[in-house]
Structures are given as C-alpha cells and as structure tokens.
Image: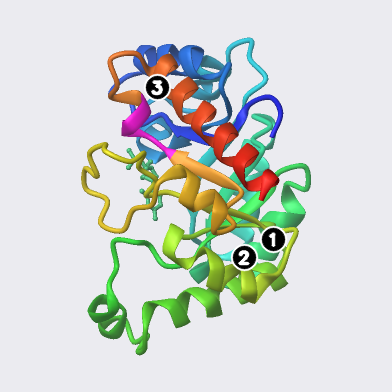
Amino acid sequence: MVGRAPIAVALDAPDLETAARWAGLVTPHVSALKIGLELYLRYGPSVVASVRGASEAEIFLDLKLHDIPATVAGAARAVARLRPALLTVHAGAGAAAIRAAAEAIPATRIVAVTVLTSLGEADLARLGMAGPVSSAVRRLAAVAIEAGARGLVCSPQEVEAVRAEVGDGIVLITPGVRPAGTDANDQARVATPEEALRSGADLLVIGRPITAAADPGAAAAAIAASLRRAEAVDSRQ
Ligand code: C5P
C-alpha cells in the first residue's frame, strides 16, 4: 500500500465548519471522505466543496438512494457535477434502479447497500424476508452487482461470504471498524482495521475512532501506519 490508507472517514459532524476541519486534518492520511445524509440535507450540495477543499481525497456520497428508477437516475444526475467517487443506492430499490443510477452517473462507482446492520433476523422476517440475514445480504449483493453496482457496503463479518458471491473487482466497503482497545460506541459487530482488510475489505469506513479523537489527524495517521505495518507483515509471510 503506497500513499493514503484505504479509509473513508465518516464526517458525521454537527456542523459544516467541524466537518471541513476534520477533512483538512485527515486528508493527508486517508483516501476518502464520507458525507452522509445528515450533513448533506442540512447544508446541501455545497457541503462537498467545503470538505473537499484543495485536497485530492475522494468523496463518498452516502445518500442511500431508494426510489423508482427514473427518480434514482434523476438524483444521480443531480449530484454528478459534485464528482463523487462513490454514491450509495439501496439494493432493495431493485435491479432497474441500480442500473438507472449506474447509467446516469458513469464516472461514479455505484455502491449498493444490502441489509442495514441495524436490522436483525426478526426485523427481516417482519418485512417478509425470512431466513438468515447473511442469505438476504448475498441475494441483494448478487442482484446489485448484476445490475451494474461496482461496490457493496457490508459488515466486516460478511466480507468473505460476499466476496465469494461477487468475485474480485467489486469494492467491498465495511463500517464497524474499531482499532483494538477503542470504544465500540453503538457498533455491535466490530473488527479491527487489520482484520477487516485481511478478510478482504477494500475500503474501511471509520468515524468516531478518528473524529472523536483529541487529534483526528494523528488518529488517522496512526491507523494508516498500523495498516501499512500489517500489510508489510502479510507480504513477508
Ligand atoms: O463512528 P463510526 O465509525 O461508527 O461511523 C461509521 C459510519 O458508517 C457512520 O457514518 C454510519 O452511519 C456508517 N454505517 C454504519 N453501518 C452501516 C452502514 C453505514 O455504521 N451498515
């Protein structure tokens, strides 16, 4: 791994100034900045320019689109001028909606969200999706990839099974990443950054372990360094 670490910092900030400050501090160390619904809906599209600044970090626009194909395509076209590297769409919107997004914004990697990690088996059963969560994840992943998604969000525990389902070339993105010894916060199923990469993740979404640190830049640099060390050890084995 050369250059910036494969980390997308979740900029879940209370205001634009904080988000821009975090972005400036972490950008030298990480490859992407994740803007979620809260920040985007509060400040609108201009939030992207504010966090991007003069940096070359990629923008991960986590808007989790979920609508009919024409509307998803229109929304994707609407954000195309922001040049996001990644844009999320719910796989549950269906193959046609995923395909519409992929065609509407070809320079952006469409990332499908399979099953939200806030949902358990009982929730899925109530929604008419009986069976283990992992089966639903694999089913939705297959539909999304066939329809043109080039990335998937999944938990670190699901990475291996999802990789087996979709093969190489698809970017697997995992939240729920916690360096050893840090607070899990509200994440139930966590893995360390090294574990997540070893199990096959391509991009780690990390928020509070970096943004709630006294020095977010130093926290990002430390995680990036630990990933480089792990990679060096692995390549010697
Ligand atoms: O602070 P933390 O590292 O938990 O932030 C994780 C980020 O990933 C948050 O922006 C959260 O909304 C997002 N996320 C998640 N679990 C998912 C999908 C997204 O935690 N399944």
Q: Nearer the viewer, residue 70 or 76?
A: 76
Report ligand 1 position as a quadrant.
Answer: top left
Q: Amino acid at mark 3?
A: Ala
Q: Nearer the viewer, residue 35 or 200?
A: 200
Q: Residue at x 57, y 44 (%)?
A: 203
Residue behind label 3 places its C-beta within 8 angstroms of ligand 1: no
Whether residues under marks 2 and 1 lie with C-beta atoms below 8 angstroms apart, the answer is: yes
Name the dominant secondary structure of the magenta segment: helix
Instruction: Say few, some or many: other residues with alpha carbon within 10 Å of mark 2 (under 14 / 14 to 19 / 20 or more).
Output: many
The circle on residue 157 is: none
Measuring from the top left, give residue 130's x and y in whole percent.
35, 89
Measuring from the top left, give residue 100's x and y in whole percent.
69, 61
Mark pair 2, 3: CA separation: 38 Å
Indicate the quadrant containing the N terminus: top left, top right, bottom left or bottom right.
Answer: top right
- Residue tagged by mark 3? 219
Residue behind label 2 places its C-beta within 8 angstroms of ligand 1: no
Instruction: Say few, some or many: other residues with alpha carbon within 10 Å of mark 3 (under 14 / 14 to 19 / 20 or more).
Output: some
Q: Amino acid at mark 2?
A: Ala
- Left or right, residue 16 beside residue 59: left
Sequence-wise first label, 2 or 3: 2
Q: Which residues, given as a range, are shown in magenta?
A: 206-210
User: Circle 3 — which element?
Assistant: helix
- Residue tagged by mark 1? 100
Q: Amino acid at mark 1?
A: Ala
- Residue tagged by mark 2? 97
- Mark 2 or 3: the one toward you: 3
How many numbered marks does the figure carry?
3
